[in-house]
Amino acid sequence: MFSALAARRHVDCIQNLEMEIRKLVSEKEKLLGERNQLQVCMSELWQNLSFLSQQVCREVQSSQTPPASATIDLTSDSPLSCLDQDSVKARCAESWQGGVGEKNSKAKRGRE
């Protein structure tokens, strides 16, 4: 009787573990799906940011004086603090020499 009871406990433990494994696998699949959705959203955000920054660069280059937003004093805590106006203008010039129309069409195709 003792061995039958012990065997039943082992079977119950195994069944509980199998159920937990199924739950964890299901949760993992759900989280992986969410991660993939977030990666797609991040990609779209980066494309939009790139497109908008190119537009800002074009506007800055076409005007004699930079817009007020381009003269904001960036603190060292800011993620953009490494950018000063001269380096931004240089990067804008480099990015626009490569052909903006081509980059915009690629960004639009990526969103479709």
Image: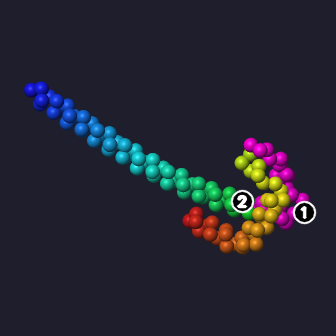
Residue under the image location 80 percent in, 59 percent down: 87
Question: Label 2 to label 1, Cα distance in Å?
Answer: 20 Å
Image quadrant of residue 98?
bottom right
Q: The residue tagged with tag 1: helix, strand or loop?
A: loop
Q: Is residue 46 left or right of residue 70?
A: left
State the scheme by which the image is colored.
Answer: rainbow
Image quadrant of residue 90?
bottom right
Residue under the image location 45 percent in, 52 percent down: 33
Quadrant placement of the N terminus: top left
Using the image as rendered, state which of residue 52 and residue 87 is in the foreground.
Answer: 87
Q: How many numbered marks have been drawn onto this rendered protein structure?
A: 2
Using the image as rendered, state which of residue 83 and residue 100 is in the foreground.
Answer: 83
Q: Amino acid at mark 1?
A: Gln
Name the disc covering residue 52, or none: 2
Query: Could you say where residue 104 lies in the image, as x and y percent from the top left?
Result: 67, 68
Quadrant placement of the C terminus: bottom right
Part of the protein shown in magenta: 55-77
Query: Could you say where residue 86 lies in the image, as x and y percent from the top left?
Result: 84, 59
Q: Which residue is mark 1?
A: 64
Q: Is residue 99 left or right of residue 60?
A: left
Residue under the image location 20 percent in, 31 percent down: 9
Image quadrant of residue 109?
bottom right
